[in-house]
Amino acid sequence: MTIHVIQANQTFIVPGSDPNDGTGLNDGDSYIFTANPAPDSVADSELKFTGSDPRTIGSLTVDGGGGDPNDMVARVLTPATQFGALTVQDGIQMNGSTLDLDTFGGIRVLGESLLDNNTTAVFENDHNDSFVLNGAMTLGSNGANSMDVSEMTFLDGTVHMTGASDTADVGISQGVGFDVACGTLRLMDGSNVQSGFFNLGQGEIDVFKTAGVTQADFDTMTHVLSLKDSGGNVIDALTMVGNTDNLAVTTGSNFRGDFIAITNNASGSTLPFTVV
């Protein structure tokens, strides 16, 4: 395995349809975006894969060098073909930086990933392909860190949110565990959250696209929190684990729309809430 360093304002191209085509750029290589020493202006660096095959890399690191995270913007692009998928074998490590990972196919991340020290990561494509997390992704406790996977179908793995200002935006998800010790988890398409679990500490879960919700109940046997309409029909259901003694359900609204907020602040419920 070779480690390739991508400097500020550099475009690094991984050529060829054969990932082992003799260029010295092989499947399993690792890539480091670095802004150290920090650039005089915004560093907009790019890692671009060409050819038509899915690609596999070792680890992906984006290091902002301790400066303004907006000064280190890293973009990772895969080919505009149905096979433009990317696998990261050894996790994503980010420090004070911004990552825009745009694939035509899906994304698969294995191992342990860490986003910390005022970091933003956006995982996206135009085809609602899958983001598969075969491991864990932690939003650190230093600064305000965010991840956005709302344009993809999020599968498996666990997300740990540990900072008071951390945010995570999620669209369709299946089988993902969310450990919301701090920060705000935004479920942008609440009715499309399936299986998985939610461990709510001092954080908050905001559930969008919940029009018609007028009441909620929590089943202490199944650990399912159900958001219901006036007729008792379930609009959304979340499996809650951990300490659920003080669950509260409130309504809210912001520029993203109306939402239902779930917290561990029992005195704050504004919807009729029943524990059964």
Image: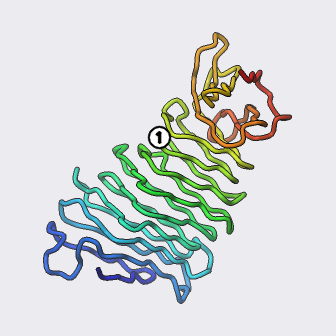
Q: Amino acid at mark 1?
A: Ser
The residue sitting at the right extreme is 267
x, y percent for residue 244: 72, 37
Residue at 68% across / 68% down in the picture? 142
> What percent of the width, then of the height, locates residue 259?
66, 34
Colour logic: rainbow
Position of 174 relative to 158 (above/below): above
Horizontal side, residue 65 vs residue 261: left or right: left
Depth check: give the residue in front, 253 or 246: 246
Place residue 2 in its image quadrant: bottom left
Q: x, y percentage for residue 4? A: 35, 82
Q: Which residue is mark 1?
A: 173
Q: Quadrant of the rendered structure where residue 46 is?
A: bottom left
Looking at this view, is 81 or 167 the one in front? 167
Say which residue appears at 70% left-offset and 53% top-offset.
182
Position of 271 relative to 179 (above/below)? above
Relative depth, front residue between 249 and 219: 219
Residue furthest bottom as drawn: 37
Left or right, residue 38 beside residue 258: left
Quarter occupied by the N terminus: bottom left
Q: Residue furthest front?
A: 221
Dot 1 falls on a residue whose secondary structure is: strand
Which quarter shows the C terminus?
top right
| Residue 156, position as x, y percentages in the image | 44, 47
Report crowding for label 1: few under 14, some 14 to 19, many 20 or more residues within 10 A (C-alpha).
many
Residue at the image position 45 percent from the left and 62 percent from the top: 100
Image: 261 above or below 21: above
